Structures are given as C-alpha cells and as structure tokens.
Image (cartoon, helix red, strand yellow):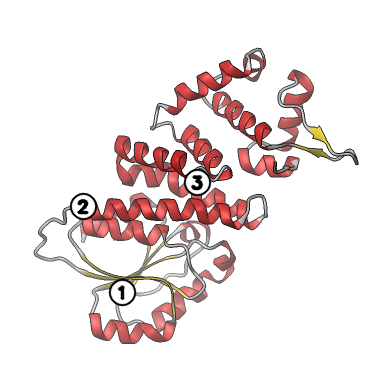
Amino acid sequence: MRKFSISDIEGLIGIKAHTIRAWEVRYNLVPSKRTPTNIRYYDEEDLKMLLNIVALNENGYKISRIARMTQNQIVELVSQLKADYHNDSVQMLSLSDATMAYDEVAFSDILAKCIAEMGLIETMDVILFPFMKRVGMLWQTGTIDPSQEHFASNLIRDRIIVEIDKVEKPEKKDAKRFLLFLPEAEMHETGLLFARYLLKKCGHETLYLGSEIPYADLKRVVTSYKPDYAFIVLTSLNLGKDVNKIIGKVMDNLNVPLIVAGSLISEFDILVKDHLTPLKNVCDMTEFLEDL
C-alpha cells in the first residue's frame, strides 16, 4: 500500500497541512501513522477518508460534527453528495479518488453522468479543466505518478472523442476552416479535442493534427488545407515561461490568424499581436466560436 507524506496529502485534497494536523489534534480525525524511524505518513485508506471529510466540510458540515460521525455515516453522506453531479467540488474529489486507485469503471461512470446531467461544455468548464490543472500540478511536484496523470487524461480524451462523434453537425453556409494542432513540446490534447467538439457543434470544418507538430511542417499544411484560422492550446506547465516565444514561433510559420487557448493563456501575460486571438476560458471559447 502506498504511503503519503503530509505534503502529498495537502496537494491531493487541497487542504493545508496545518489544518490536517489540527483536525488530528483536536478531533483525532484520521491520525497519521509512523514509520519505524518515526516519520509521519498516511496510507490509501487514510487518503480516502480525508477526501470524504473534505467533501462533507466543503458542503456545509462542520469538522466538529464530522468528528462525531462513524465512518459508515461519513461514507453514506458522501454517497448522497456524489449523486448530485452539479456539485463540482465533490465530483473533482471523486475523480481524484478514482485516479489514485486506477479505477477506470468509477472514473468513466462519473464522467458519463456529469456529461449526461450538465452537457460536455459545463462539465469541462467547472469540473474537468480544473481537475486536470490540479492533476498536472500534482504530477509536476511528484505527488502522483505520471501513470496516474496519463490514466485520467486518456479517459477524458476518449470521452471527448465519444461526444464529438455524437454531434450532428449543423448546416452552416459561411462555415470556416480550422487547422487544429499542438506545437512542439505540447502533448496534452484535452483542450484541443474540446475545441474540435465546439467547432463541430458550431458547424465549422476542422483538420485535426494532434500533438507536437513540428514548426517546419506548418507552412506545407497551410498551403495544402488553406484554413481560415489555426487553433492551438497551451497547458504544459514547463512551457509557461516560454509561452510568448512559442506563440511567436507558431505565427512565424503560419500566414493565417491564430487562436490560442489553454490554462497558460489565463496565467501569463500574452503579448498583443495582429492576427492573434487569445481565449482565456471556456466562456471566451464558446462566445468567439459561436460569433464567427
């Protein structure tokens, strides 16, 4: 069974370490274990219980009240909360739990039910994009394994593809042509696939190239496909400091307007350029594409 440090737990449940310790000292909630050398740690069962406690606490239950509950009562109340698929904080915690356990059935079931209740656009906006951002940060800090990040990303990717296939593309007389790709060193396709979903829903044409397309290939593709716009998504944290440099290199190899979205666009100052449209969030994306 995997062991977690207090800093691991802090990242996974989104609660400060000093708060977790206070819960233990005041209420004996999920007391930490000790190694033979007296190092504090938590196991997977502790993590699950802490995720449940956070879910209740974020939904109005005081810690003092939770501390008086039995483990079965806590689990039952959280199960009731999980039935509300509009409850983004609970669903994110549930996805985290399924990711840590590599539980594909549970993860896929949460995705399917959230999308059935809210639709893909709202699910991406309030649950999946925040969840993936958090997972990426946990991967970068070593709190979760790369395999767990890939597990979650691939299941989300597969689900978006299913939703793309479901869309009945409307007739649009003035449909635009979009070239969708990720530049070199960017491999996270979730946002780009979501853009493809939105574009199909709006009746536009797309050529989807996927991840890590060499800059040198762009001019040939543009000459052949003749898109009205190019669309990229930038999310990899290690690219943050170079985000404007990357955008510049993409534009140097294109002669069409560029749309750029992704979490890095909301976190860094994007230099103003002609023929560049930065989209900071899902609302920006949907409004821009619907207005074309």
Q: Amino acid at mark 3?
A: Phe
Q: Residues within 10 Å of mark 2 (few under 14, many from 20)?
A: some
Report x, y in % for residue 168: 16, 53
Q: Amino acid at mark 1?
A: Pro
The label nearer to you, 2 versus 1, is: 2
Q: Residues within 10 Å of mark 3 (few under 14, many from 20)?
A: many
Q: State which tag comes first along the sequence, 2 or 3.
A: 3
| Distance (Cα) linking label 2 and label 1 | 26 Å
Asked whether the beta carbons under mark 2 and mark 3 sit within 8 Å of each other, the answer is: no
The label nearer to you, 1 versus 3, is: 3
Quarter of the image where the C terminus is located: bottom left
Disc 3 secondary structure class: helix
Q: 262 and 134: which one is in front?
A: 134
| Distance (Cα) linking label 1 and label 3 | 30 Å
Q: Residue at x 48, y 57 (%)?
A: 263
Q: Is residue 37 left or right of residue 74?
A: right
Q: Which residue is mark 1?
A: 257
Q: Residue at x 68, y 32 (%)?
A: 46
Please say if 180 is above or below 280: below
Please say if 146 is above or below 256: above
Report x, y in % for residue 11: 65, 44
Q: Which residue is mark 2?
A: 167
Q: Which residue is mark 3?
A: 131
Q: Residue at x 16, y 56 (%)?
A: 169
Report x, y in % for residue 200: 22, 59
| Distance (Cα) linking label 2 and label 3 | 24 Å
